[in-house]
Amino acid sequence: MTRLLFWIALIILVVMAVRSKLRAAVAARGFDPHAGQGGTPAGGATRAQPRVEESERMTNCAHCGIYFPASEAVHEGGQDYCSQAHARLPASSRPD
């Protein structure tokens, strides 16, 4: 019984030590781990939000149907294609 209590106490001490080290590491980076998701800098000041790039419009290939960024489209005959090879295919091989 004494061995069991010894091992339980040892495990509790190890867990407490690890948690203490993790808290110290987070505090050293300047973030408050209890300030919600993502944390805020110590002292309550808010950080500038990182700039989120706007998403690009997507289009699909008139031949294979795959979606890709519109800036990469090959325009041929009023249609958008994913590559020059699909734009050059004969009309009979294109699925409707």
Image (cartoon, helix red, strand yellow):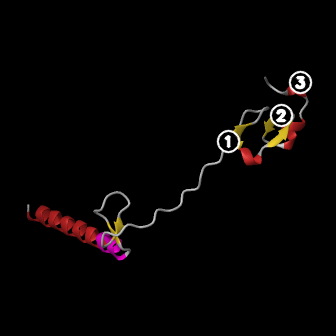
Residue 13 lies in quadrant: bottom left
Q: Identify residue for label 3.
A: 92
Q: Amino acid at mark 1?
A: Met
Could you say where residue 23 lies in the image, as x and y percent from the top left? 29, 70
Q: Magenta stretch: residue 25 in it? A: yes
User: Where's residue 26, x and y in %?
Assistant: 34, 71
Looking at the rendered structure, the secondary structure element under dot 3 is: helix
> Residue beneath label 2, please?
78
Q: Is 62 rendered above or below residue 42?
A: above
Please report whichever mark, 3 or 2, sits nearer to the chain's N-terminal start: 2
Residue 88's x, y, as percent? Answer: 90, 37
Mark 3, Cα crowd under 10 Å, few <14 / some 14-19 / many 20+, is few
User: Mark 2 touching mark 1, by CB under 8 A?
Assistant: no
Label 2 sits on what residue type? Gly
* Residue 57, quarter of picture: top right
Q: Is residue 25 left or right of residue 6?
A: right
Residue 71 image point, x, y percent: 74, 48
Question: Looking at the image, do the residues carrying marks 1 and 3 touch, with CB atoms under 8 Å apart?
Answer: no
Q: Main secondary structure of the magenta part?
A: helix
Query: Taking 93 as reference, is 61 left or right?
Result: left
Q: Three-letter amino acid code at disc 3?
A: Ser
For the point 36% across and 74% down, which residue is it?
A: 30
What segment carries the magenta color? 22-28
Q: Is residue 95 magenta?
A: no
x 8%, y 65%: residue = 2
User: Which quadrant, please, contains the C terminus?
Assistant: top right
Label 1, on which residue?
Answer: 58
